[in-house]
Amino acid sequence: MLGIDRKFNKNPIIVPFLKWAGGKRWLVSAHPELLPSSYKNYLEPFLGSGAVYFHMRPKVAILGDANAELIETYQQIKNNWSSVEEILNSYHQQHTKDFYYEIRTSVFDTAVERAAKFIYLNRTCWNGLYRVNLSGNFNVPIGTKKHVLLSTDDFKSVSKQLNNTELHATDFQTIIENAQKNDFLFVDPPYTVKHNLNGFVKYNNKLFSWDDQIRLRDAIDNAVSRGVKVLLTNADHESIHDLYQNIGEKMSLNRSSVISGKASARGKYSELIIKCYKT
């Protein structure tokens, strides 16, 4: 893999095609100076909407997520974007409340249909939230968005960006263990805290436990010792500060929350950023 320098990447801007709870569009918009000016290979084990990846546009990357449906969707955009877009155009024309729930309960045989379903639900469900029930079925109600296709859509450019990117539906540790000296590792896990008292527990507790947070800390500690450049985001909570007591430079950054269903619960909240390199 060839080394690259973010400063000299002149590709056009690519807007993430998914909305994701805890997404990092705010980070790359407000604090691009936190990202490394140069690095070898890009790795990200909790992909989500890929806001940092699409901002940095690395020539070679290894991306992963434990959500197999998410990774399958990226793979279809990479390899079959025009067919996905064709189905989304059809959904755009048919979108209604009844149609939403019909698609939500539909089971499709092909990967391209499943990818289109994933994007459709992401764009039209409540706040772009991904949540499944105990049976593994997506159960988020319809939201207020009316548009399935967006003015920012450029699936062809997304496909081109993904061309030299590996995609893996896997545990975070597998991706992190691939990171070597001078690689850039961006890590944005679910924000589970000790005793599970944080506001995200209803979404994350069964997906990412406190034991997983400890495993992640150990994996990051090992990566830093190998000379990997690590940028970690996490809950700005005492238990996370304690967990990463001797790792990296810590800072608390404020951002807006729009996930809460109650307007009174929305507003500014703080996230912890841990940076393990010199920019």
Image: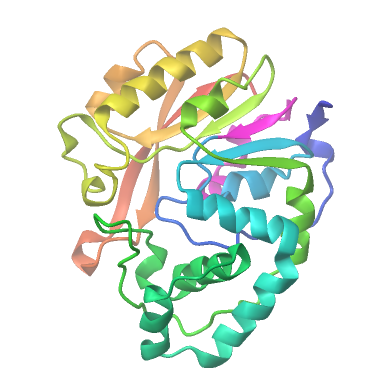
Horizontal side of 60 relative to 219 (left or right) equals right
**Spot occupied by residue 237 in the image (x, y as percentages of width and height):** 26, 32
Q: Residue at x 27, y 25 (%)?
A: 211
Q: Is residue 248 visible?
A: no
- Taking the view exactly as shown, the residue that stands out farthest to the top is 225
* Observer-nearest of 254 and 38: 38
Horizontal side of 263 relative to 171 (left or right) equals left
Within the magenta stretch, is there residue 30? yes
Q: Residue at x 31, y 18 (%)?
A: 243
Number of marks in picture = 0
Horizontal side of 185 relative to 98 (left or right) equals right
**Spot occupied by residue 23 in the image (x, y as percentages of width and height):** 47, 51
* Observer-nearest of 170 and 253: 170
Q: Quadrant of residue 121?
A: bottom left
* Observer-nearest of 222 and 274: 222
Q: Residue at x 54, y 66 (%)?
A: 114
Q: How is the image coloured?
A: rainbow
Q: Quadrant of residue 20?
A: bottom left
Asked if 106 appears above or below 252 in the picture, the reply is below
Start-end of magenta stretch: 24-44
Q: Quadrant of residue 101?
A: bottom left
Q: Quadrant of the N terminus?
A: top right
Asked if 183 appears above or below 60 in the picture, the reply is above
**Spot occupied by residue 269 in the image (x, y as percentages of width and height):** 31, 47
**Spot occupied by residue 46 in the image (x, y as percentages of width and height):** 49, 40
Q: Residue at x 63, y 83 (%)?
A: 89
Q: Is residue 112 visible?
A: yes
